[in-house]
Image (cartoon, rainbow, N blue to C red):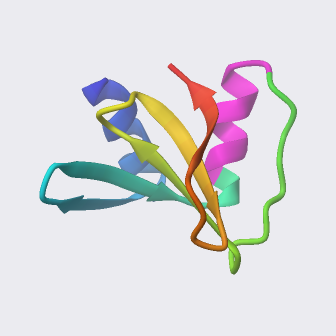
């Protein structure tokens, strides 16, 4: 898991830690790289309304639309 976290940070992801939450926020470009590696279709989410991040504890890339409950985009 640390390899994925490090890879995303190297690609430009921004690490965020608070209490028991650990995330790395990512852009559409980084999400598309991760989707390609898993042979998934690329996405183009508006970054103003969507927050895309790696949830380190859940081992998943998640997306929250307009601050709603995050949904899994890619499970590792």
Most foreground residue, 21 or 54: 21
Where residue 30 sits in the image (x, y, percent)?
61, 49
Q: What residue is drawn where x is 32% and y is 26%?
A: 3
By secondary structure, the bulk of the magenta-drawn segment is best described as helix
Position of residue 13 in the picture relative to residue 64 (left or right): left
Position of residue 53 in the picture relative to residue 28 (left or right): left
Q: What residue is drawn where x is 31% and y is 39%?
A: 6
Most foreground residue, 5 or 69: 69
Residue 74's place in the image compared with 49, above or below, is: above
Position of the N terminus, as image quadrant, is top left
Q: What residue is drawn where x is 84% and y is 40%?
A: 42
Which residue occupies the extreme left position in the image?
Answer: 19
Q: Which residues are magenta?
A: 30-39
Which residue occupies the extreme front position in the image?
Answer: 69
Residue 19's place in the image compared with 1, above or below, is: below
Query: Magenta stretch containing residue 38, yes or no?
Result: yes
Where residue 53 sits in the image (x, y, percent)?
49, 52
Q: Quadrant of residue 55?
A: top left
Residue 73's place in the image compared with 59, above or below, is: below
Q: Quadrant of residue 45?
A: bottom right
Q: What residue is drawn where x is 48% and y is 32%?
A: 60
Where residue 51 sits in the image (x, y, percent)?
58, 64
Query: Magenta stretch containing residue 9, yes or no?
Result: no
């Amino acid at each position: 898991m640390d390899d994925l976290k490090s890879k995303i940070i190297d690609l430009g992801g921004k690490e965020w830690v608070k209490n028991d939450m650990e995330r790395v926020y990512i852009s559409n470009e980084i999400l598309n790289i991760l989707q390609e590696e898993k042979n998934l279709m690329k996405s183009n989410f508006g970054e103003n309304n969507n927050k895309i991040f790696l949830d380190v504890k859940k081992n998943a890339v998640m997306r929250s639309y307009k601050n709603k409950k995050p949904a899994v985009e890619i499970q590792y």
